[in-house]
Amino acid sequence: MRRAGLSEGTSGNYVASGYSVYEDENEHLQEGLREKVKALKHLSIDIGAEVKIHNKMLEDMDTDFDSTGGLLGATIGRVKKLSRGSQTKLLCYMLLFCFFVFFILYWFIKLR
């Protein structure tokens, strides 16, 4: 029996079309979620590459600081050896020369 222009076949299609609207919306949302996941994946890969580069730079800096520390330790040892001897005038002249060089460098940097 027909009521208001609806037959038995069309009522089933009406329910199915309601579900298809929800399925279409779900597929659309899934596609948006896939795009966001892809963007996050690429972002995390880029962050990982950046971290590797920075770790390498830190390792290089650590090596440089270690070698500089060794050089500075050897220099301090030589200065101590000089101070133990009777060469106190030489040590004073060397300290005055260092202060003069640092003052000149400070003056050049300040003028820029």
Image: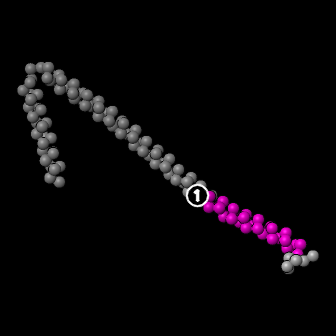
User: Quadrant location of residue 89?
Assistant: top left
Q: Is residue 21 magenta?
A: yes
**In the foreground, 36 or 47:** 36
From the image, which quarter does the C terminus lie in? bottom left
| Residue at the (8%, 24%) spot, across then down | 88
Q: Is residue 85 magenta?
A: no
Question: In the rendered structure, which segment of residues is drawn in magenta?
Answer: 7-33
| Residue at the (56%, 52%) spot, across then down | 41
**In the foreground, 24 or 66:** 24
- Whether 36 is drawn above or below 17: the answer is above
Residue neighbourhood size for the residue with mark 1, other residues' Cα within 10 Å, grouped as few (<14), some (14–19), many (≥20)? few
Farthest residue to the bottom: give it.
Answer: 5
- Whether 56 is drawn above or below 16: the answer is above
- Give the x, y percent position of residue 71: 26, 31
Farthest residue to the left: give it.
Answer: 89
In screen coordinates, is 79 left or right of 71? left
- Give the x, y percent position of residue 66: 33, 33
| Residue at the (39%, 40%) spot, across then down | 58
The residue tagged 1 is 36
Farthest residue to the front: give it.
Answer: 3
Q: Main secondary structure of the magenta part?
A: helix
